[in-house]
Image (cartoon, rainbow, N blue to C red):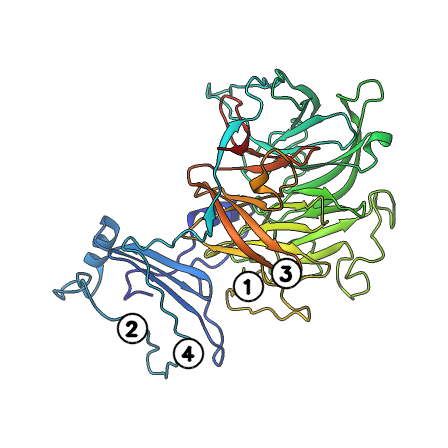
Amino acid sequence: WLYQLYRPVKPAWAKQFEEQVGIKTPDVDDATRPAGEWNEIYLRIAANQCEVAVNGVSYYRFKLNDDDWAARVAKSKFANLPLFGKAGKGHICLQDHGNVVSFRSIKLRELPEDGSVPNPVDGRLALKSELAFPNLKWAGRDEEEESGRVRPLRPMVLTQADDGTNRVFVATQRGAIHVFENSSAATETKMFLNLTEKVHDWKKDNEEGLLGLAFHPKNKENGFFYVYYSSEQEPHVSIVSRFKASADDPNVADPQSETIVMKIPQPFANHNGGSIAFGPDGYLYIGLGDGGGRNDPLRSGQDLGSWMGSILRIDVDGKSDGANYAVPSDNPFVKRDGAKPEIFAYGFRNLWRIAFDRQTGHLWASDVGQDRWEEVNVVRAGGNYGWSGREAGFGFGNVPVKSDDPVVDPAWMYDHQVGKSITGGYVYRGKAVPSLQGKYLYADYVSGKVWALEYDPTGEKSTKNYAIVDGGLPILAFGEDAQGEVYYLIESATGKSIYRFVEE
C-alpha cells in the first residue's frame, strides 16, 4: 500500500465478469509469497506517474497531482504534513515493519521522460495497407440494431477450404459464415451458414460468440467443416460442432447437419479462446483460455484435470467413450493419472489465436496476458507454458509453478507499455509481399501496433522483430487464403473489414 493512498483493488472489468456468474474473489489483491520465498517488485516511475506490480500482479497506478491524487492526499492522516504528496524528488523505500528486508537482483532501466517503454523492434518494413475486397457487400447483414444504431461487422475468421476452388470463407462473431470468390473484384458474399439463432450475442458478453472455423482436410470429399461457438441455449458453454456443405450447392451449408463434437463449460464469459485449426497430422486443435476472471481464480492454467488453459488435440474421424471424437494415442498426457487426455499443451491464459505454419508445421499460439506481458509461443507437445504461475517469462502471483513439466519460455514477449492485448496471426508463405516471407505476423488490439517476427526454429528463438504499423490499428484477427496470403480483420460499421499489406 502507498501510505494509505493506494491499495491493490480489483478492477471494474473483473467485477463485471464475476457478477455475471455469481463468483466472488477478494476485493484486495495479495500477491505476496510466503515467508522464505522471494518476491518481485516492479516500479515504473516517470516525472509525474508511477506503476507498481508485485509478483507480476498490478497493484496500482497513479499520476502525481491529478484530481484523484489530490483527493486521496486530502483525506490522508498525513495531509497536515507540508510536503506529503508534494515532493518532487525523493527515495524509493520498501519496508516490512519490524522485520528484516533483503534485496537481490536489483535491475534499473532508464526510460524516456514520459515513462513509456520503447517499441521492441529491429527495423521497419516498408509496407502499407489496402482494402482487399473494396466492393464487397455482405449478404443478409442486418446493419441496424433495435436502438437504431449501426451494428458493426466483427469478422473473427478468414480461411479457405483447401479444395482448389479459390473461395474465401469469413465467419463473424455474431454467427454468420460468408463465402465469396477470392478476387479483389468480388462484389457480394453468399450466406454459407447462418448460426445467429444458436450463437450467444457478443453484445451481451463481448468475449463470446462464434470464435472458430476450420475445414476438414478431406472437405473436398466429405464436405465437413467445424465451428466453435458460444451457445445461446446453454449459458457459458462453448460448443465445437461439425457441419456439412450441401451436396447440391457447395456454397451453402445445411444447418440441420450439425453434429456436436464437444461441449466445453466456461466458468466465466471471458477468456474463451476459441480458435480451431487442423494440423498437418489431420487432427483438430482447439485453443482455450483459462475460463476467465482475474488472476486465474480457479487455478485452471496449471490443472491438467481441466480443459481450461490448454490446447486440445482430438481425432474428429473417430469416436470413443460415447463422444463424437477420439483421443489420439500419442497425445502427451493420455497415460498421466488425473489428466484430461485431450490436452496437447497447457499453461495458457487466453489464446488469441493459434495457427500452423503451412511450410514447417510449427504451431504458433499468441497468449493474452493480464497485467504486464503479452507473449508469442511456438508450441510443442506436452509443453507447460506457465500460466498462472508465470506470465510470459516472469513469475506471477503467490502460487509458483509446481508442475513436473518444465516451463517453456515464450518465443517472444512484450511489455504492457507497448500493448495490452495480443492478436496472433500467421507465418507468411505467400508471394505478393516478399519482405514478409517466413515472418510471423501479429498485432496488439489495444495499442494498434503491428509487427513481423523472425524465428530460428533450429535455435528455437526469435531473431528479429520488425515494425509494420506504429499504432491505431485494432486488429481482431488475421486470416490466410489458399495461396498463403495473409489478411487482417477489423471491426467496421461500413463492412470494410478485410485488409492486407502490400509493398510501398
Secondary element type, mark 2: loop
- How far apart marks 4 and 2 lie (CA) works out to 15 Å
Check disc 2 and give the amino acid type. Cys
- Residue 43 x/y as whole percent: 36, 64
Viewed as shown, does residue 387 lie left or right of 99? Answer: right
Q: Which residue is mark 3?
A: 460
Q: Which residue is mark 2?
A: 93
From the viewer's perspective, is the residue at label 4 or at label 2 nearer? 4
Viewed as shown, does residue 91 lie left or right of 455? Answer: left
Q: In the rendered structure, which disc, 3 or 4, sits on the residue that comes first in sequence?
A: 4
- How far apart marks 1 and 2 lie (CA) works out to 26 Å
Kindly identify the residue that appears in the image at 24 percent across and 71 percent down. Answer: 91
Q: In the rendered structure, which disc, 4 or 2, sits on the residue that comes first in sequence?
A: 2
- Answer above or below: position of 263 versus 259: below
Tag 4 and tag 2, C-beta contact below 8 Å:
no
- Answer above or below: position of 495 versus 200: above
- How far apart marks 3 and 2 lie (CA) works out to 40 Å
- Answer above or below: position of 476 versus 457: above
Kindly identify the residue that appears in the image at 21 percent across and 69 percent down. Answer: 90
Viewed as shown, does residue 36 lie left or right of 228? Answer: left
Locate the N terminus and report the quarter of the image it occupies.
bottom left
Q: Which residue is mark 1?
A: 390
Q: Which residue is mark 4?
A: 104
